[in-house]
């Protein structure tokens, strides 16, 4: 038995912990604090030792029990260090957090009730039928240009989507809150794209079959939104002339943007909702990090990247196994996305610059020139901001790079 700064003859002060046994054959257990959202995956013997510590006996009794039960000594200092990293130990000056009821839980239950599912299904089916019967309201890229001003189109693309993005993230949050899981909303980055994301860290503490709805709830919201916006546009359409009016055209523009966000989810290599679905189904813990580390190591071996030793001692076996093939999908996916951006952004930039030159040469109004300049700034600015965030991530967390 090794020495420790904690008194072996006293119980270890611990916060309230949540235990969830995983479905795998190795008996791993997810343990953590629901109040902070910090969780870790422990081997079966480590989880059993921690359970023993929570029963109120002394630290020495727990260590003796482990050695008797498993026939080997435990490095208690290392074990306590791990518990400290996950914030499980109550240190001097701390108090055990009291359980707090999760807000909006009843709303979450209502939003995913049988009656709500019937409503969502009816809206989606009706939307599809209308798209077939009235092709003019079906999603099409031309719907984006519902006004002549490029700046208005770009501003509407950004600000008009925010309410629908919040609906997407709210569905994630409510699907989690119906299970008693707290959530938070933050702005993140996926390669060169800025994204909103809902944190549902406590999801790992519920049975796997209950995790799928919170993961896919955002896509459900997108599907309902596309159908609902299409139905509104169809209602506003003049049957005689086919004119949709400004509001109808705006609805179709939003429907197209939302559909594109739905398609975006299939870029799972950018850690979209479907990425987390795959990780959950395959039992992975941190697949993206392991896959990137493997990919960098492979590229370093062929001298495409500088060699950088990787500590793979804490890689989960399942992540290691899946990352062997998933890392190649990440490479192909990144190349595809970057290529798509180049093919879309570069021609758009060239076209807009040429348009600006033409407007200046033809003596266009100042407003016309400003319209094109602002369109360029708004188009390229989002990628520049993503680059700034990426640089900040590297400077703030250099130790996290594999």
Image (tube, helix red, strand yellow):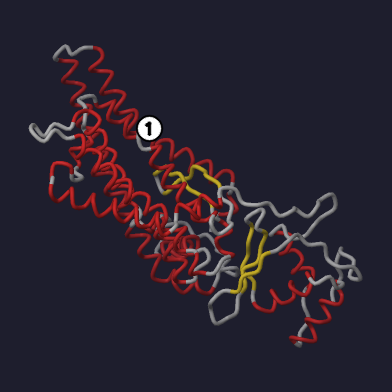
Seen at 77% across and 77% down, the residue is: 74
Q: Which is nearer the eye, 187 or 77?
A: 187
**Residue 64 shown left or right of residue 353 in the figure:** right
Image location (x, y in percent) of residue 326: 39, 67
Image location (x, y in percent) of residue 359: 17, 18
Q: Is residue 217 above or below residue 53?
A: above
**Residue 84 shown left or right of residue 115 in the figure:** right
Residue found at the far front of this picture:
115
Seen at 87% across and 70% down, the residue is: 3
Numbered disc 1: secondary structure: helix
Seen at 18% across and 43% down, the residue is: 140
Q: Is residue 230 above or below residue 368?
A: below
**Residue 256 shown left or right of residue 58 in the figure:** left
Q: Is residue 90 above or below residue 135?
A: below
- Quadrant containing the N terminus in the rendered view: bottom right
**Residue 322 shown left or right of residue 338 in the figure:** right
Image location (x, y in percent) of residue 62: 82, 76
Q: How many marks?
A: 1
Callout 1 crowding tier (Cα within 10 Å): few <14, some 14–19, many ≥20: few
Seen at 19% across and 21% down, the residue is: 357
Query: Which residue is label 1 attached to?
Result: 159
Q: Which is nearer the eye, 154 or 80?
A: 154
Q: Which is nearer the eye, 68 or 121?
A: 121
């Amino acid at each position: 038995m090794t020495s420790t700064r904690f008194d072996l003859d006293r119980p270890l002060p611990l916060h309230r912990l949540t235990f969830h046994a995983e479905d795998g054959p190795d008996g791993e257990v997810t343990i953590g604090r629901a109040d902070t959202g910090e969780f870790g995956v422990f081997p079966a013997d480590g989880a059993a030792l921690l359970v023993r510590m929570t029963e109120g006996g002394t630290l020495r009794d727990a260590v003796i029990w482990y050695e008797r039960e498993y026939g080997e000594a435990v490095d208690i200092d290392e074990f306590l260090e791990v518990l400290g990293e996950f914030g499980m130990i109550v240190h001097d000056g701390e108090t055990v957090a009291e359980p707090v009821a999760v807000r909006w839980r009843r709303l979450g239950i209502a939003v995913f009730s049988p009656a709500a599912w019937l409503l969502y299904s009816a809206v989606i089916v009706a939307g599809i039928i209308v798209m077939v019967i009235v092709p003019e309201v079906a999603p099409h890229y031309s719907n984006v240009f519902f006004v002549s001003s490029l700046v208005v189109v770009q501003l509407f693309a950004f600000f008009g989507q925010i309410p629908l993005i919040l609906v997407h993230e709210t569905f994630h949050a409510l699907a989690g809150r119906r299970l008693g899981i707290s959530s938070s909303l933050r702005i993140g980055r996926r390669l060169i794209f800025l994204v909103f994301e809902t944190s549902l860290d406590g999801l790992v503490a519920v049975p796997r079959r209950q995790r799928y709805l919170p993961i896919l709830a955002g896509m459900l919201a997108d599907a309902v939104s596309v159908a609902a916006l299409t139905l509104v546009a169809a209602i506003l359409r003049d049957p005689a002339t086919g004119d949709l009016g400004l509001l109808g055209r705006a609805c179709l523009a939003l429907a197209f943007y939302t559909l594109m966000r739905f398609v975006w989810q299939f870029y799972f290599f950018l850690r979209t909702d479907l990425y987390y679905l795959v990780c959950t189904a395959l039992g992975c813990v941190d697949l993206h990090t392991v896959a990137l580390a493997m990919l960098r190591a492979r590229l370093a071996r062929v001298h495409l990247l500088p060699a950088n030793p990787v500590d793979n001692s804490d890689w989960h076996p399942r992540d290691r196994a899946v990352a062997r093939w998933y890392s190649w999908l990440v490479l192909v996916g990144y190349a595809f996305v970057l290529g798509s951006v180049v093919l879309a952004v570069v021609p758009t930039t060239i076209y807009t610059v040429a348009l600006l030159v033409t407007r200046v040469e033809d003596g266009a109004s100042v407003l016309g020139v400003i319209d094109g300049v602002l369109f360029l700034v708004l188009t390229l600015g989002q990628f520049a901001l993503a680059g700034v965030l990426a640089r900040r991530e590297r400077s703030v967390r250099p130790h996290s790079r594999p």
